[in-house]
């Protein structure tokens, strides 16, 4: 005989019988509290940088003129202080403006919930995120989702396969799961090389594109240091093809100073200078009956002849 489960009867406090529906709904709403800014601690390992760029200056001006219209999100710590989940730029702008307190929404969040909330709110409110910011934010959110029970397998395969959580994150952030996996690989770069990937977005040099950076992320840290030394000396970063070759040597334990420099000393296609000559002007000086395949030789011979002519004139002086 199957034993019937006992029906659980919800327990109500005496006050619940005397509260109106409006009062009950009001209790469920998030409350905005004014909190002393000195009690707010930055989120641990916060992946997003607070850069005082034009966007930050506009935010600061808005706070100066209208106050903080979008409250910060925090959670209370056991020591009575608060951990900042969302609002690091607003906090810094407020400090620069000399404000003593800021409006905050206090949420009761677990560590994993706090990470997801921090990443999601920053992606929602920030524009022009750097590759390094995306990389560490995606990795933190991936770890949080994994802890919450959504199983995934992070492997070391090229561009990382079987990472189911990346597809979940991709759907939420408007990226493909494959692109999420690429960004997570960037976290294996040493900081100096990761900065070169950011330089691609910042318009600074030297810079390294995303695809070669992913291949380089599979190199050991000591090998990445050798590459960094080459880049600093030559201001040249690897192409995608060169990065693949470097990774191949690394995986076979054959990458050292000599082999790295041998690969990197080869000119990349975009480093080879191509000269363009106006076609109309060119055909005015070429013989009318010259064949197309002979034009290059004719130009080189003409240049060599003119070079000898200048040398002879120099001797006659």
Image (cartoon, grey):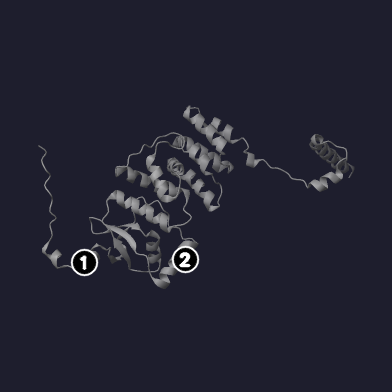
Quarter of the figure that contains the C terminus:
top right
**Residue at point 44%, 44% (across, down):** 180
The answer to whether one can see residue 158 in this image is yes
Chain-order first, disc 1 or disc 2: 1
Residue 272, image x, y percentages: 67, 40
Quarter of the figure that contains the N terminus:
top left
**Residue at point 38%, 52% (across, down):** 119
Residue 57, image x, y percentages: 47, 65
**Residue at point 21%, 66% (across, down):** 21
Residue underneath mark 2: 58
Viewer-nearest of labels 1 and 2?
1
Is 242 positioned to the left or the right of 1 in the image? right
Is 60 positioned to the left or the right of 284 in the image? left
Q: Does dot 2 land on a helix, a strand or a loop?
A: helix
Residue 33, image x, y percentages: 28, 66
Q: Does dot 1 land on a helix, a strand or a loop?
A: helix
**Residue at point 13%, 65% (across, down):** 17
């Amino acid at each position: 005989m199957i034993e019937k489960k006992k029906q659980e009867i919800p327990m109500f406090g005496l006050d619940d019988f005397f509260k109106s529906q409006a009062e009950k709904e009001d209790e469920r709403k998030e409350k905005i509290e004014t909190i002393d800014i000195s009690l707010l601690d930055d989120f641990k390992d916060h992946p997003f940088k607070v850069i005082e760029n034009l966007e930050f200056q506009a935010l600061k001006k808005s706070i100066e003129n209208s106050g903080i219209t979008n409250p910060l999100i925090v959670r209370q710590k056991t020591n009575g202080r608060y951990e900042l989940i969302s609002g690091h730029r607003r906090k810094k702008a407020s400090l620069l403006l000399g404000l003593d307190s800021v409006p905050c929404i206090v949420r009761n969040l677990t560590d994993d919930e706090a990470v997801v909330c921090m990443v999601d709110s920053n992606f929602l409110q920030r524009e022009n995120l750097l590759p390094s910011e995306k990389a560490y934010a995606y990795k933190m959110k991936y770890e949080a989702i994994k802890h919450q029970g959504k199983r995934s397998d992070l492997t070391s395969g090229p561009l990382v396969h079987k990472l189911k959580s990346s597809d979940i994150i991709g759907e939420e952030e408007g990226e493909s799961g494959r692109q999420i996996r690429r960004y997570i690989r960037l976290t294996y770069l040493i900081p100096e090389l990761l900065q070169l990937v950011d330089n691609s977005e910042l318009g600074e040099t030297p810079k390294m594109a995303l695809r070669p950076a992913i291949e380089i992320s599979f190199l050991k840290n000591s090998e990445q240091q050798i590459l960094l030394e080459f880049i600093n000396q030559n201001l040249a970063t690897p192409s995608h093809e060169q990065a693949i070759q470097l990774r191949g040597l690394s995986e076979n334990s054959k990458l050292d100073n000599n082999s790295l420099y041998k690969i990197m000393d080869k000119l990349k296609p975009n480093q080879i200078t191509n000269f363009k000559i106006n076609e109309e002007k060119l055909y005015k000086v070429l013989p009318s009956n010259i064949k197309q395949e002979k034009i290059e030789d004719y130009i080189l011979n003409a240049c060599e002849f003119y070079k000898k002519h200048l040398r002879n004139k120099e001797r006659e002086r």
